[in-house]
Image (spheres, grey):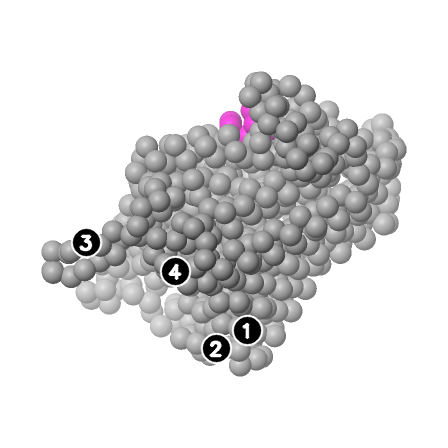
Amino acid sequence: MVLDILPAVITYGAAGVAAWFLGGYMVKVYKGERVWLSRVIRPVERVTYRIIGVDEDHEQGWIAYLVSILAITVMGLVFTYLVLRFQDHLPLNPQNLPGVPAPLAFNTAVSFATNTNWQDYSGETTMSYFSQIVGLVLHNFLSAATGMAIAIVVIRSIARRTMNTVGNFWVDAVRGTLYVLLPISVVIALVLVANGAIENFSGYSIVHTLTNGVQTIAQGPVASQEAIKDLGTNGGGFFNANSAHPFENPNGFTNALEIFSVLLIPFALVITFGKWVGNVKQGIALGAVMGIILIGAFGVAAWQEQQGNPALVGTGATQVASAQSPGGNMEGKEVRFGAIQTAQFGTATTGTSTGAVDSAHDSWTAIGGMIPLVLLKLGEITPGGVGSGLYGMVVFAIVAVFIAGLMVGRTPEYVGKKIEGRDVKYAAIAILVLPASILGFSALATLTAGGQAGPLATQGTPHQLTEIFYAFASTTGNNGSAFAGLSGNTLYYNLMLAGAMWMGRYLFIIPVMALAGSLVKKKIVPASAGTFPTDGPLFVALLVGTILVVAALTFFPAVSLGPILEHFKLIAVH
């Protein structure tokens, strides 16, 4: 048991240490200061601005910044849709795969444009190499850079005083891509290749098995996509099996590396926040909240997966697979990783907006599978996606200081900015977007024939409800993982899930950007004896409580009818 936990502890520790240094580096990058990569990248940065016609010294207000985000997103979505539809006429298609059907192409284009990477297809049998490395990887970088840029806007809005501009989207996106995402992705890809991940443009291999059968082994440029898939908290796999496939995730070390990559930038951004506003303790407080909930979730999931399925305990031959077996619940898991490393991977990728999987979440125990679902419904702020975790956490922090202000009878403040009624309304709207989408779309799916046909094999069971809720929680939270029992490649789910992805990404960032536009205009008020400190343990506890209470009040009825009811039914069978 200790030997299983130790790698998890090392991975968390390594991510924390690396995040500290990366966070300080990103302060310099986004402020336009010289860093150790400037000699190589700065000339490329200047050329990029000339090509796209951007003046790097010109700044935008929050509305213009938001319009720029929406414009490039729509253009990228249309481009990817066309690439997928006409991939049979484009190069790098050694398997001569046909064009992707219109509903699936639309769903996929929306999915990757919103950093969701929900996949209603098997990559190795649907997408050409060109579609993978041009149509999809384009968004792996762009959507991640966009999330980081929005986080930087929120940081600037808090650090600045009495200004009307929040930065320049094009400059922020270029710097995030060139100085952060690309260099780290190259390093991760090389490490993956060194450990056995593949990277080639060969045609698929046909081999003869020992039983005289014939097997097709897919090939492709896998390691490069795997790197940005994890670093950018995208999650879309080259193969249908995602990170359970040995070509994507060859061994225990690469499994830990992928978890490290997923956590790196979300935790680094809280350090960026703290250092930029001049009080690193503010960032550490947010990071502590993220870490407490994430590690707590991992602990519950690992414990439950070690217990196994209670319905199999003491049933003769099946006792080997029972709660008493050392491996716990190994159904749907890679034996290379085991239950604990699998639980760490699953909670890391659902605590962020990654959505990568190294196991089948659908086969986890009822309570074990509930944990990823709950992390999705928290709004993916523990630690959340690249950028989205930080600005989502700041939204909750605004609500928390508002509650604290009500308790002490003072105007709430956060990092020197007075929080007024309009700011709280923006924060409340952002928080309400997620349950409105998750519960609204899920309710519709449970009441319609098209929605009920998705999880047909579990019709009328609590697990059916869990599969439906998970799908809309995952797409609304721009995560992309799934309870694999739901068949999403139908006209109904392709359209409904695409709507949830768009709503979860862009209806959330609109009030966030409006909040940033409001905060940037405010003066910074010096702390006084009546100021509630937001950089200490008391605020950490208040913020954790706020997040859990909001989630519990909003989603507990749905969760109780799904995984909790399923858990008690399994106990009753035993």
Label 3, residues with CA under 10 Å away: few <14, some 14-19, many ≥20: few
Q: Does residue 95 lie above or below 231 as drawn?
A: below
Q: Amino acid at mark 3?
A: Val
Write the residue at 74% across / 52% down.
Answer: 510
Chain-order first, disc 3 or disc 4: 4
Identify residue type, mark 4: Leu
Q: What x and y, as percent, mark residue 22?
A: 56, 27
Residue at the location (51% across, 77% down)?
452
Where 488 sits versus 304, above or below?
below
The range drawn in magenta is 16-23
Q: Name the disc covering residue 492, or none.
A: 1
User: Which of pointers 1 and 4 indicates the residue nearer the eye?
Assistant: 4
User: Is disc 1 in contact with disc 2, using a CB cutoff of under 8 Å?
Assistant: yes
Mark 2 or 4: in front is: 4
Of the two numbered discs 3 and 2 on the same chain, state the one appearing first in sequence. Answer: 3
Q: Main secondary structure of the magenta part?
A: helix
Position of 38 compared to 568: left or right? right
